[in-house]
Image (cartoon, helix red, strand yellow):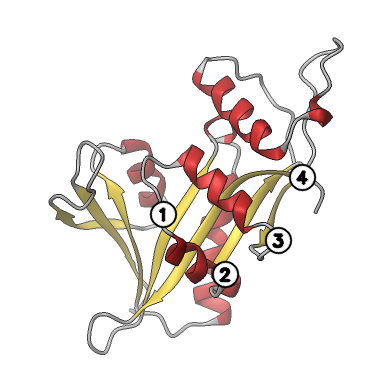
Amino acid sequence: MTVKTMSKNNDDHDDDKLSHDEKIDENNSNAMNGLVRKRRPGIIELGDVTPHNIKLLRRLNQVIFPVSYNAKFYKDVLESGPLAKLAYYNDIMVGAVCCRVDTSEPNTRRLYIMTLGCLASYRRLGIGTKMVEHILDYVSQKDSNFDSIFLHVQINNEDAIEFYQKFGFEIIETRKNYYKRIEPPDAHVLSKNLKK
């Protein structure tokens, strides 16, 4: 899939000369500086995570999330197959979802959403919804042997909590000091039960 940028205006600025990492930084910093423009409806697509684009996923995660992920995380992502997807908006990589199967509890098979995020300037365009719908489709159509889906959300991330609640996730627990290097360090565990 080709990575393109959308031009900002008609001046001599040439977005095609920017590297993809610069485009990620530029798009995110524009959102933080309040320079977000209204976008025309775009095409949202999901693509596979491969050894060829894993470094882009790492860079994207560095921009989106306040925590760092180690090499083992990215190794696990490459082995996740359809449980890890990159999100593209008009061919620009703007987000990703990465999941893994969790069997840590006896006689229980759960899907753990390790990360699901989108660049700030591309939020509220349906990209997060597309990624959650992909996961829900996977557990209902391709592998229906999951008991639940769960994830951790920092307790002050009200937007994320509300977002997941729209899909039937509920706060089932609060883990004290879950995060090591960010404030607040506590996380809610959100879960969606899949068994009736």
Who comes first in sequence, dot 3 or dot 2? 3
**Residue receiving disc 1:** 69
**Residue receiving disc 2:** 78
Q: Is residue 173 above or below residue 2?
A: below
Q: Secondary structure at mark 2?
A: helix
User: Can you say which quadrant of the picture contains the N terminus?
Assistant: bottom right
**Residue receiving disc 3:** 52
Image location of residue 67, percent across then percent down: 36, 45
Quarter of the figure with residue 46: bottom right
At label 3, which amino acid type do we have?
His
User: What's the distance in space between the residues labelled 1 and 4, CA to CA?
Assistant: 25 Å
Q: Secondary structure at mark 3?
A: loop
**Residue receiving disc 4:** 91
Q: Residue at x 63, y 26 (%)?
A: 26
Q: Is residue 49 left or right of residue 195?
A: right
Q: Is residue 90 above or below residue 35?
A: below
Who comes first in sequence, dot 4 or dot 3? 3
